[in-house]
């Protein structure tokens, strides 16, 4: 996904990030190096940096087993109604078992972190493209069943969802995407390199899947202990890059009855241990447009007796982007950029048809909805002036992902419980696309960016590159954040909050 100063991926809306100068490995992707730094890096330091009673808890980077947590076992809400230790950073509202959450997470991670890292590596070695994620789906389902859960596979055979906890309260969804990209894995020196030629988890979806699985397993334990005040639905969505898997999930009833949805996306621009938040739009829409112009054609000596199609097409190509920019709020950053223009074959004949193809990117949901009609009207008016016929094919990609402020606040409250105080950072809107936006057209929710870069590592990673990798310490961080966010949202009753009360949540 996302990133500042990154070109949008040229061929599609999905999590977009330019393909970048690929193949230019910066050599800092090795997992071994990342793990060696485990106990020395400034970050992630996790709860150990928080104040008060939890100073002895291991941070996210502490390997399982090295420092036995002193956490209490699961306990009832009645026995744990104390705010977290992070003076003023804890969740608002009373009656939450917040103090117990962090130690419980540490106990869970001490037992499961190694397994989760191995799970991620297994997916990484066996990446599958959109709608072909059969092995991935089977692995996830198998692990969920092992914990007594009952996953439901989507009708097309890949992707699944799974409910945890009682259905009589609010329902919160945690979403992961499970597909890989048609790229060659160019990483050197890691044991978990892709074994499938030309396919790689270069957008971090293996990590997303692992984190949602980990959070799910933890929440299932909470549910068993009677600590889940509602239901959590794990969504393992196929084909995000295609894109369109979100629509399959929705068609299968995947968000029916869901009050809020949350997702994390790996961000190689921020450090492991950090969470990037933003209210409002966080990714962009990306659609494709195909314009076809036709006229009678004729001799270039007599344009007045026919319709000068090439001239008209040139007018359309230049007028449409500028007219559009004057018809919508500039803050929506609606931009039409042509990628292909074609007409004619010889110097002295006016052709009878021509085409222009391009993409529309847009940061604003309302402008995105209005774009097709507006463009059609503008096209007709320019074409009419030059007496040519013009038609428009407008192909929808994904809508912008528009984060609800209250949901962002829930991420923030959750991070205050389980991350370092400096763990939350503001993040810019990306011109890339992300099909999580489809869910947020129907229900409130938020997508946050999870830091995956090893602190101090040189070089630039980017998504959608053959050498993309993560610092695997992001996995327990993501599990903590997702589990705490789901619980925070359930504690808040899953209801849309009064926007007035979350004004402070707006980061950008
Ligand atoms: Zn992607
Ligand atoms: Zn992605």
Image: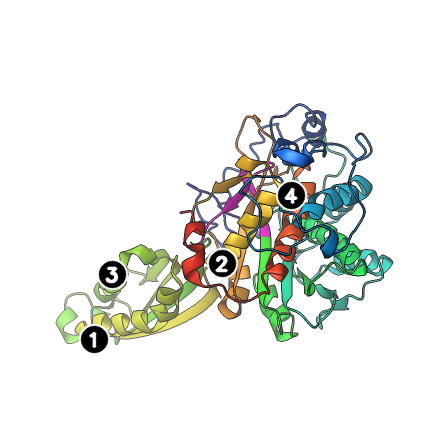
The residue lying at 71 percent from left, 47 percent from top is: 100
Instruction: Tell me which numbered mark, 3 or 2, is placed earlier along the sequence.
Output: 3
Front position among marks 2 and 1 = 2
Q: Is 463 contained in the magenta span? A: no
Residue span colored magenta = 264-280
Instruction: Tell me which numbered mark, 2 or 4, is placed earlier along the sequence.
Output: 4
Mark seen at residue 384: 1
The residue lying at 45 percent from left, 49 percent from top is: 8
Q: Quadrant of residue 36?
A: top right
**For the residues marked 1 and 4, what is the alpha-carbon distance in whole angstroms?**
48 Å
The residue tagged 4 is 184
Front position among marks 4 and 3 = 4
**For the residues marked 3 and 2, what is the alpha-carbon distance in whole angstroms?**
46 Å
Residue 152 location in percent, x, y? 76, 69
**For the residues marked 4 and 3, what is the alpha-carbon distance in whole angstroms?**
39 Å
Task: Please name the predominant secondary structure of the magenta segment in the image.
Answer: strand
Instruction: Tell me which numbered mark, 1 or 4, is placed earlier along the sequence.
Output: 4
The residue tagged 2 is 406
The residue lying at 43 percent from left, 42 percent from top is: 4
The residue tagged 3 is 314
Tell me whether circle 2 and circle 1 mark residues in contact (CB < 8 Å).
no
Helix, strand or loop status at disc 1 = helix
Q: How crowded is mark 1: few (under 14 residues within 10 Å), some or many (20 or more)?
A: few
């Amino acid at each position: 996904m996302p990133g500042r100063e990154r070109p949008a991926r040229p061929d599609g809306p999905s999590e977009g990030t330019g393909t970048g100068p690929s193949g230019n490995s910066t050599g800092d992707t090795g997992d071994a190096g990342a793990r060696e730094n485990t106990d020395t890096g400034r970050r992630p330091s996790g709860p150990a940096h928080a104040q008060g009673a939890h100073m002895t808890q291991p941070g996210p980077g502490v390997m399982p087993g090295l420092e036995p947590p002193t956490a209490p076992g699961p306990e009832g809400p009645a026995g744990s109604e104390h705010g977290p230790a992070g003076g003023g950073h804890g969740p608002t509202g009373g009656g939450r078992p917040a103090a117990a959450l962090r130690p419980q997470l540490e106990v869970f991670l001490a037992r499961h972190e190694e397994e989760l890292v191995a799970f991620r590596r297994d997916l990484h070695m066996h990446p599958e493209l959109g709608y072909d994620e059969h092995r991935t789906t089977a692995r996830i389902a198998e692990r969920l069943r092992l914990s007594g859960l009952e996953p439901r596979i989507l009708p097309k055979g890949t992707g699944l969802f799974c409910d945890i906890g009682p259905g009589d309260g609010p329902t919160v969804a945690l979403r992961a995407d499970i597909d890989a990209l048609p790229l060659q894995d160019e990483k050197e020196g890691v044991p978990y390199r892709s074994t499938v030629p030309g396919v790689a988890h270069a957008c971090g979806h293996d990590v997303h899947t692992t984190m949602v699985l980990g959070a799910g397993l933890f929440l299932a334990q909470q549910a068993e202990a009677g600590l889940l005040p509602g239901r959590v639905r794990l969504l393992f969505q196929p084909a995000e890059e295609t894109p369109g898997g979100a629509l399959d999930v929705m068609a299968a009833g995947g968000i029916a009855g869901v009050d809020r949805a949350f997702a994390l996306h790996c961000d190689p621009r921020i450090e492991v241990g950090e969470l990037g938040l933003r209210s409002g739009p966080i990714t962009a829409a990306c659609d494709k447009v195909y314009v076809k112009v036709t006229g009678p054609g004729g001799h270039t000596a007599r344009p007045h007796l026919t319709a000068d199609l090439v001239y008209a097409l040139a007018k359309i190509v230049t007028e449409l982007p500028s007219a559009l920019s004057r018809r919508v709020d500039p803050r929506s950053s609606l931009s039409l950029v042509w990628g292909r223009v074609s007409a004619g074959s010889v110097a002295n004949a006016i052709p009878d048809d021509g085409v222009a193809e391009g993409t529309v990117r847009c940061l604003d949901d309302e402008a995105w909805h209005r774009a097709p009609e507006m463009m059609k009207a503008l096209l007709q008016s320019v074409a009419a002036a030059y007496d040519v016929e013009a038609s428009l094919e407008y192909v929808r990609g994904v809508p912008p992902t528009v984060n609800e402020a209250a949901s962002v606040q829930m991420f923030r409250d959750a991070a205050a419980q389980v991350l370092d105080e400096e763990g939350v950072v503001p993040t810019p809107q990306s011109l890339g696309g992300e099909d999580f936006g489809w869910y947020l057209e129907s229900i409130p929710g938020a997508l946050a960016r999870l830091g995956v870069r090893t602190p101090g590592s040189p070089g630039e990673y980017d998504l959608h590159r053959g050498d993309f990798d993560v610092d695997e310490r992001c996995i327990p961080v993501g599990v903590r954040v997702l589990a705490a966010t789901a619980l925070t949202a359930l504690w808040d009753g899953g209801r849309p909050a009064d926007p007035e009360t979350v004004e402070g949540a707006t980061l950008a």
